[in-house]
Amino acid sequence: MLVFGLTKRLSTDSSCISNALRTGRIVRYMTQDIHEKIFFNRKWELDKFNNAFSSYPELRVVLGPPSTGKTTLIREVVTNKDNFKPLFLDCRSGQFDFSKNLYDSISMQFKPFFKKRIKSLKNIMPEDLKAKLPFFKLNFKIFDKSEITPSSVSELLVEITRAFLKWNIWHSNYASPHILVVDEANLLSQLGDSSKEGAILLKTFLNWLVLNTKQENRFHAVLTSSDSFFLNWITNLLHIPHIIPYVVGDLNKEDAEEYFEKHVLPQYGVFTEPSIYTYCSSHDGTRMLIIDRYVKEYKNNEGKLTDRKFSVFELEYDKLCSGLVPVRSSGKPCKPL
């Protein structure tokens, strides 16, 4: 889970934004789910994101291939040392095809968040300041409506906006910055594809993100996606140039070798000669997911893993063959040209 050491330039309509990301070493950490993860400690990136999230809210998009550490990096930043107050909306665990599902997915995250924050802030804020903040007058019944319509979703978003503290409040000593992390945000397209009503709700939700980041300065929003077309999709949908993109790529050769030798081999109890890494990287690249799978299958095959037996190679090889020699409707392959 390492950011590749590169500078990536992405176009967002009228502007181009460069983001240089560097490399680091392995450390262990505990997430909020209390599951142990492996994280490449990238001090430079952590410092940059810490500084960014401590400043004015922005709408950020973090892109990269699957299993390159996008979510792990962001979670490490926002959960480390209690510097921020994050909310996580995982699109893989929710449904976004109808208004009720969108309402339930948002409520599931925001209701416990507000209850916890209100309780803690009541103990530290002056009475005169608390009286002026809608944050303490949030109607929690909005999270438990029995009948959900598109209007209910809009009402929910308005109430959440009113309840969030603005940047000039949480930038003081009273509160930590709020950050909404939407993982696999490309799945939000399910809502837009479901119906005309869904397309309107999707635009409402995305505009709500812009309102609370750029305009109202209430919270940061970070959207992660493995879909390479996601950035174009969201910028075209919102018609805005100020989304800030970041790219998390594959490992470079040096860090891939360190990941291979110091983490993957001990994890599977495999001790082998260095030539295996050279063979693996030259044939299969430096993506952590593929390195991990190669060693796992190497062990399962008792050190006799050939190219044809490696699942990743086999899948790509079969795709190539079916493309060069497509199958007729009769089930028989076509003759090659």
Image: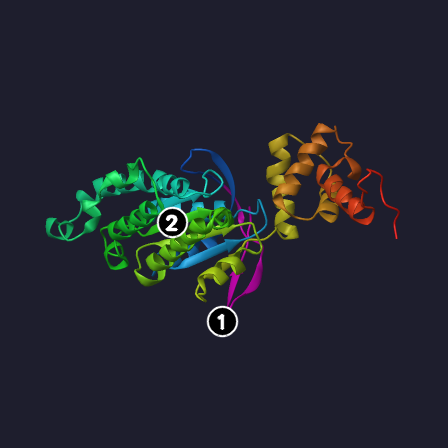
> Magenta span covers which residues?
1-27
Q: Is residue 335 visible?
A: yes
Q: Please, which residue is most extreme toward the left here?
A: 128
Where disc 1 sits, the SS reads loop
Horizontal side, residue 81 vs residue 40: left or right:
left
**How far separated are the C-alphas under marks 1 and 2?**
26 Å
Residue at image mark 2: 180
Residue positioned 22% across, 48% down in the render: 135
Pointer 1 residue: 14
Q: Considering the whole magenta stretch, tell me its main secondary structure.
A: strand
Q: For numbered disc 2, what is the local secondary structure? A: strand
Please name the amino acid that badge 2 sits on: Leu
Residue 62 spot, x, y in % from top left:
50, 54
* Amino acid at the residue labelled 1: Ser
Look at the image and name its color scheme: rainbow
Is 270 on the left-hand or right-hand side of 314?
left
Q: x and y percent of residue 333 in the render?
A: 85, 42
Tell me where residue 124 appears, x and y as whole percent: 18, 46
Q: Looking at the image, which residue sits at the far bottom?
A: 14
Instruction: Please state which of the two labelled residues, at mark 1 or mark 2, is closer to the viewer.
Output: 1
For disc 2, the neighbor class at 10 Å (few under 14, some 14 to 19, many from 20) is many
User: Magenta stretch containing residue 2, yes or no?
Assistant: yes
Residue 167 versus residue 141 in the image, above or below: below
Residue 40 is covered by the magenta coloring:
no
Residue 175 visible in rendering: no
Name the one closer to the observer, 253 or 122.
122
Q: Nearer the viewer, residue 242 or 271?
A: 242
Label 1 or label 2, whichever comes before in sequence order: 1
